[in-house]
């Protein structure tokens, strides 16, 4: 049985088809394909909205990696890059909003103080504690950078 988010993606697919939105259509089709791959995989997990969000996030990360590679190769303005950026913008509406850098910094400060961490070697522990309790709410790269800066790692 489809999750509420899957149903919403299905509705968005219809909207994109009617509107002739090629970018949105490509994004929704790919996400739905990735979800179906997970659903039909051997030992497949139960499909939940959290898994759908995880799938969207993984696809956005893959798109961003492709953009970064093409940009590094000097093709930052080609059609693939423009399409990928458009898909990322389109899919952003389905992802929960992450804490901004100031909110993440406050979180890092609080966890480091609560745990009494001062040694730069404890940066991994602090990052792990934050990611365990705030997965999906914070950007892992930002957390890691802020923890390293806080502890001087």
Image (tube, rainbow, N blue to C red):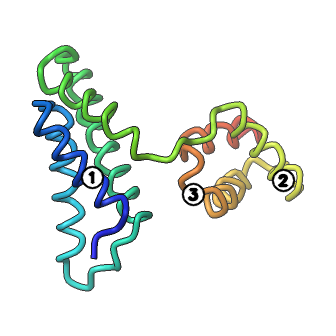
Rounded to the nearest whole Å, what is the CA distance between mark 2 and mark 3?
A: 21 Å
In this rendering, the label closer to the viewer, 1 or 2: 1
Quadrant in which residue 114 is drawn: bottom right
- Nearer-the-camera pick, 89 or 119: 89
Cβ atoms at labels 1 and 2 below 8 Å apart: no
Total labels: the figure holds: 3
Q: Residue at x 31, y 34 (%)?
A: 90
Cβ atoms at labels 2 and 3 below 8 Å apart: no
Residue 20 tag number = none
State left or right for residue 11 relative to residue 144.
Answer: left
Q: Secondary structure at mark 2?
A: loop
Quadrant in which residue 52 is drawn: bottom left
Mark 2 Cα-neighbour bin, 10 Å: few <14, some 14–19, many ≥20: some
Q: Which residue is mark 1?
A: 9
Q: Which residue is mark 2?
A: 117
- Nearer-the-camera pick, 122 or 132: 132
State the quadrant of the N terminus.
bottom left
- Toward the bottom, the furthest residue is 43
- Nearer-the-camera pick, 92 or 102: 92
State left or right for residue 77 relative to residue 117.
Answer: left
Mark 3 Cα-neighbour bin, 10 Å: few <14, some 14–19, many ≥20: few
Which mark is first along the chain, 2 or 1? 1
Q: Residue at x 50, y 47 (%)?
A: 96
Q: Residue at x 84, y 53 (%)?
A: 117
Residue 49 screen position, x and y as percent: 41, 64
Rounded to the nearest whole Å, what is the CA distance between mark 1 and mark 3?
A: 23 Å
Q: Which residue is mark 3?
A: 135
Quadrant in which residue 67 is drawn: top left
């Amino acid at each position: 049985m489809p999750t509420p988010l899957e149903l919403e993606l299905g509705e968005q697919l219809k909207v994109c088809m009617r509107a002739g939105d090629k970018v949105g259509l490509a994004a929704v089709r790919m996400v739905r394909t990735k979800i179906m791959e997970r659903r039909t995989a051997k030992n497949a997990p139960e499909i939940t909205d959290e898994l759908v969000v995880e799938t969207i996030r993984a696809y956005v990360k893959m798109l961003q990696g492709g953009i970064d590679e093409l940009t590094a190769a000097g093709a930052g303005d080609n059609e693939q890059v423009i399409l990928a950026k458009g898909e990322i913008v389109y899919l952003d509406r389905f992802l929960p909003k992450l804490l901004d850098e100031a909110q993440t910094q406050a979180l890092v400060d609080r966890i480091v103080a609560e745990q009494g961490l001062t040694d730069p070697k404890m940066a991994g522990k602090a990052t792990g504690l934050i990611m365990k309790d705030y997965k999906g709410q914070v950007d892992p790269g930002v957390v890691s950078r802020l923890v390293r800066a806080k502890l001087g790692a």
